Image (cartoon, grey):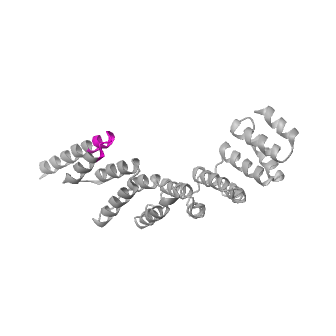
Amino acid sequence: MSRLQGFSNSNRFIDNCILQMYCDCKSFTAAERFFDKMVDRDLLSWATIISAYTKEGHTDEAVRLLLHILDLGIKPNSSIFSTLIMSFTDPSLLDLGKQIHSQLIRNEFAADISVETLISKMYVKCGWLDGAEVSINKMTRKNVVACTRLMVGYTQAARHSDAMSLFAKMISQGVELDEFVFSIVLKACAALGDLYTGRQIHSVCIKLGLKSEVSVGTPLVEFYNKCARFDAAHRAFETI
């Protein structure tokens, strides 16, 4: 029996390698035919073909396969879900993204920090900023990547006050900040003409040794120019 089991595992390994080869060569028709003929599929087999579909933009097909996995009573791993989530980058895919999010919750993957980050990114990419905010608020541990991405989404949507509020939450909740966060919040201050807050942030940047960073210095110059503080803008420019 152990020999038969070993033979089966060996065949599965070879089949998965062949399937991956077809996908890597972008021979998707051959990959689909081979996948359909595979007798002994495992999660890697499913993940390989789903990943191939998403890379080619065939998101509907990838979702169809995921639903088929669930119908078969197979529990997908987080890798399969993550692959799908990363492919949802357009508002037209928002409803599909919500469906996958629901499946993540049902399969108890939604609390994984990497999955949570991908979910919030998906909602930002699909233009549902309120959904991204809810997702971040549910995180057991906030991270700068997810928060920064939402801040960018807010500023791109001209929701500068929301970007400022999120920045304040990040500080109060002890989220580690980097120079990119400060560059975004300075742009929000410039858009709002908020001289007082912008000056406070400038002071923090000086304390953290970030004022000479181009990613911070350039938004500082723009901020002071927007607020008609041209001498301060010139001084900020000189420190870059």
Q: In this orientation, which residue lies closer to the viewer: 1 or 226? A: 226
Which is more toward the observer, 204 or 215?
215
The answer to whether any part of residue 178 appears in the image is no
Where does residue 231 sit, x and y in percent of width and height?
88, 38
Quadrant in the picture for residue 216: top right
Of residue 223 and residue 180, the one placed in the foreground of this image is 223
Q: How many marks?
A: 0
Q: Is 63 positioned to the left or the right of 130 in the image?
A: left
Residue 230 quadrant:
top right
Q: Position of residue 52 (x, y in %)?
A: 35, 48
Position of the C terminus by quadrant: top right
Left or right for 189, reference 19: right
Q: Main secondary structure of the magenta part?
A: helix
Q: Is residue 70 above or below residue 196?
A: below
Q: Which residues are magenta?
A: 19-28
Side (left or right) of 219 relative to 95: right
Q: Residue at x 32, y 50 (%)?
A: 49
Whole-percent x, y for residue 104 in the image? 43, 63
Please name the residue shown 41% across and 67% down the image.
106
The question of residue 27 being in magenta is answered with yes
Residue 114 horizontal/vertical position (percent): 49, 53
Q: Does the magenta-highlighted stretch encompass residue 203?
A: no
Left or right: 92 as drawn, with respect to 20: right
Q: Is residue 147 visible?
A: yes
142 or 190, which is in the foreground?
A: 190
